[in-house]
Amino acid sequence: MQVNAWRLRHAAHLLRHGGVIAYPTEAVYGLGCDPLNDVAVARLLELKSRPEHKGLILIGSKLEQLLPFLVPLQADIQQRVQRSWPGPVTWLLPAAKWVPTWLRGEHDTLAVRVTGHPVAHALCESFGGALVSTSANPAGAAPARTPLTVRRYFGEQLDFVLHGEVNRRGRPSEIRDALSSRVIRPA
């Protein structure tokens, strides 16, 4: 899947300056922003009508983009997690002490994934780090699978929609707890 270089650079520029954008992921369109910009995250949560206590998912193009947000991983856990990446598996891992509640919610863990989607991967690379990734839909509505649905949900409230195809799975990523190996949300 070819990504328009200008659109990708523009999206990354907006993210670095507090923007909230939509972009394709493995299964659905996601809403994203800079995870360390509290104003952008608050805006994203408001758009979705999502309470902060639930926490958010971070995606990266490689594990190194996610490691600063995490407690150092035991070798066996890191190997188990890395075997599933890149791809549509999100892991709950112990969050570093400094990680703000707007990311981890009321939890001691943080949901993270190395994306296998070419557009989301390229976006993280262009941005230069991890991004918030939550389904592009208001609370209670079906996740958007097309740019048109994203616009129907959010109109001009978003700063940008980066176009691309979502994979045919149609379901959000599986979520697993890395410490217990329990599946929280099946694929």
Image: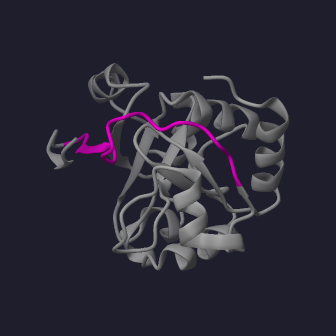
x then y, percent, for residue 83: 32, 19
Magenta segment range?
A: 161-179
Q: Quadrant of residue 119?
A: top right
As drawn, 3 above or below 128: above
The residue sitting at 57% across, 27% down in the picture is 118
Is 139 left, or right, of 118 in this rendering? left
- Which quadrant would the C terminus be assigned to in this image? top left
- Which quadrant would the N terminus be assigned to in this image? top right
x then y, percent, for residue 47: 56, 75
Residue 177 within the segment the image draws in magenta: yes
The residue sitting at 36% across, 35% down in the picture is 168
As drawn, 183 above or below 118: below
Is 4 left, or right, of 49 in this rendering? right
Determine if residue 156 is in view: yes
The residue sitting at 43% across, 39% down in the picture is 113
Determine if residue 99 is in view: no
Please tell me which residue lies in front, 153 or 47.
153
Is 165 left, or right, of 53 in this rendering? right
The residue sitting at 67% across, 37% down in the picture is 123
x then y, percent, for residue 169: 32, 37
Q: Main secondary structure of the magenta part?
A: loop
Q: How many marks?
A: 0
Q: Quadrant of residue 44?
A: bottom right
Residue 102 within the segment the image draws in magenta: no
x then y, percent, for residue 80: 27, 24
